[in-house]
């Protein structure tokens, strides 16, 4: 039972998230041969104030 965790900065539409789940599921099914019904996709959305790169929060970037 593959479980895929996807972490994203918030801001995508419901339609984009729906498409992401479908596409990730399809890719896992194709590459691993896992049964589609067993593939789970978990999306975690983060605020830009809760994510940083090289010591700078995304929300503080110019």
Image (spheres, rainbow, N blue to C red):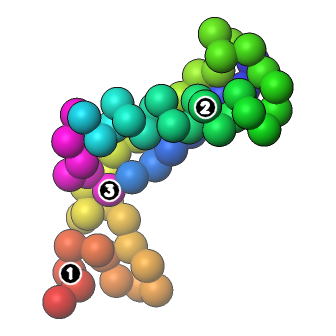
**Label 2 to label 3: alpha-carbon separation:** 23 Å
Residue shown at 20%/81% (left/top)?
A: 60
Towards the viewer: 60 or 1? 1
- Circle 3 SS class: strand
Callout 2 crowding tier (Cα within 10 Å): few <14, some 14–19, many ≥20: some
Residue 3 in the figure: left or right of residue 17: right
**Residue closest to the eye, 15 or 5:** 15
Disc 1 secondary structure class? helix
Kindly identify which residue carries mark 1: 60
Q: Is residue 32 above or below residue 48?
A: above
Give the x, y percent position of residue 21. Answer: 46, 32
The image quarter containing residue 37 is top right
Instruction: Specify few, some or many for label 3: CA neighbours under 10 Å numbering under 14, 14-19, or 20 or more.
Output: some
**Mark positioned earlier in the residue sequence (3 or 1):** 3
Label whose residue precedes the other's in the sequence (2 or 3)? 3
Residue carrying label 3: 9
Q: Residue at x 21, y 73 (%)?
A: 59
Q: Which numbered circle lies on residue 26?
A: 2
Quick check: can you spot residue 28? yes
Classify 10 Å Cα crowding around label 1: few (below 14), some (14-19), many (20 and above). few
| Highlighted magenta segment, given as a residue range | 9-14
Say above or below: 6 vs 15: below
Quadrant in which the C terminus appears: bottom left
Camera-side mark, 3 or 1: 3
């Amino acid at each position: 039972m593959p479980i895929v965790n996807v972490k994203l900065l918030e801001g995508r539409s419901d339609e984009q998230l729906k498409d992401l789940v479908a596409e990730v599921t399809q890719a896992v099914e194709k590459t691993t041969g896992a049964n589609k019904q067993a593939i789970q996709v978990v999306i975690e959305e983060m605020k830009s104030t809760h994510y940083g790169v090289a010591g700078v929060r995304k929300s503080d970037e110019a």
